[in-house]
């Protein structure tokens, strides 16, 4: 029977991020992708214009209906969408302790639109505590979680440790927006690991979604966390290099994103 991965994320009608991108990644790795929608964004490749969140009961009903029929091999959480959804997400994570669970804490779009109310972030951090395999914030998200500006490699190390302290979840902090270099950091609760690549001067939409969903795939395939992070970093680098324009805004990831014969 084909293994199933679940994405709980926002709906981006351009297909460049969110649940639609996650399902493409799952398919590329040979999994069947199931998706539950936390929010609907009104956007194109240029910017997010608006966000609509269905009632939280819709998220719960989507999950409950799928869970009665499907067995999941892993879960990826993306945009929560609303404070009301956070509790549902925490319940979903708690009900799936034995499988890989990746949280990409999507708080704000690159164009500046809030995708989770800023005042809901402390509740989000508190409710997910200890309920995932890894958390994958970018620099801005790490700053919102810790209350500190994260702009340098040293501040990244400190933020990753602080996030682990707050959440009891290993933290993979994405440093693609560092000024002079592109370095990601994993703090697993004991050790810090660095993953570096040359910086690519290309504005690509959905890289965080792509990384977190590919990371889930590598974990579901049985890779340990450090190796999965290394593989997902390399795959994402290739996906950024090969990203294409489909409209007048940012590049999007094209599929197949990269050669997957290495996984």
Image (cartoon, grey):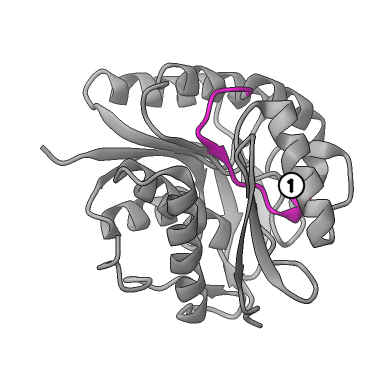
Q: In which quadrant of the rendered image does the C terminus lie?
A: bottom left
- Which percent across, then down, holds residue 247? 53, 78
Visible residue check, residue 117: no
- Which percent across, then down, holds residue 255? 34, 71
Whether residue 140 is in magenta: the answer is: yes
Task: Name the residue rendered at 36%, 57% in the picture.
Answer: 25
Compare residues 186 and 16 and report the one nearer the observer: 186
- Which percent across, then down, holds residue 190? 64, 36
Residue 147, quarter of the rendered image? top right
Compare residues 103 and 153 and report the one nearer the observer: 153
Left or right position of 2 against 27: left
Give the residue at mark 1.
141
Report crowding for label 1: few under 14, some 14 to 19, many 20 or more residues within 10 A (C-alpha): many
What kind of element bears circle 1? Answer: helix
Q: Give the range drawn in magenta.
A: 129-141
Q: Give the tally of numbered discs.
A: 1
Q: In which quadrant of the rendered image does the N terminus lie?
A: top left
Compare residues 139 and 61 and report the one nearer the observer: 139
């Amino acid at each position: 029977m084909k293994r199933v991965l679940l994405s709980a994320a926002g709906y981006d009608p351009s297909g460049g991020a969110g649940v639609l991108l996650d399902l493409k990644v799952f398919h590329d790795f040979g999994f069947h992708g199931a998706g539950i929608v936390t929010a609907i964004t009104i956007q194109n490749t240029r910017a997010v214009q608006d966000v609509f969140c269905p009632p939280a009961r819709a998220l719960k009903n989507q999950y409950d209906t799928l869970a009665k029929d499907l067995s999941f091999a892993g879960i990826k959480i993306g945009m929560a969408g609303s404070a009301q959804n956070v509790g549902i997400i925490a319940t979903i994570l708690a009900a799936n302790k034995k499988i890989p669970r990746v949280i990409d804490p999507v708080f704000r779009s690159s164009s500046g639109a809030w995708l989770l109310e800023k005042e809901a972030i402390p509740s989000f951090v508190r409710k997910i505590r200890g309920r995932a395999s890894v958390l994958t914030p970018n620099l801005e998200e790490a700053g919102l979680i810790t209350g500190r500006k994260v702009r340098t490699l040293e501040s990244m190390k400190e933020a990753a440790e602080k996030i682990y302290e707050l959440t009891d979840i290993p933290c993979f902090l994405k440093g693609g927006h560092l000024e002079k270099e592109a370095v990601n950091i994993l703090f697993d609760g004991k050790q810090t690991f660095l993953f570096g690549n040359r910086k690519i001067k290309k504005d690509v939409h959905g890289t965080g979604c792509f990384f977190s969903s590919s990371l889930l795939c590598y974990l579901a395939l049985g890779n340990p966390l450090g190796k999965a992070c290394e593989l997902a970093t390399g795959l994402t680098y290739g996906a950024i290099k090969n990203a294409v324009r489909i409209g007048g805004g940012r590049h999007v990831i094209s599929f197949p994103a990269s050669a997957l014969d290495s996984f």
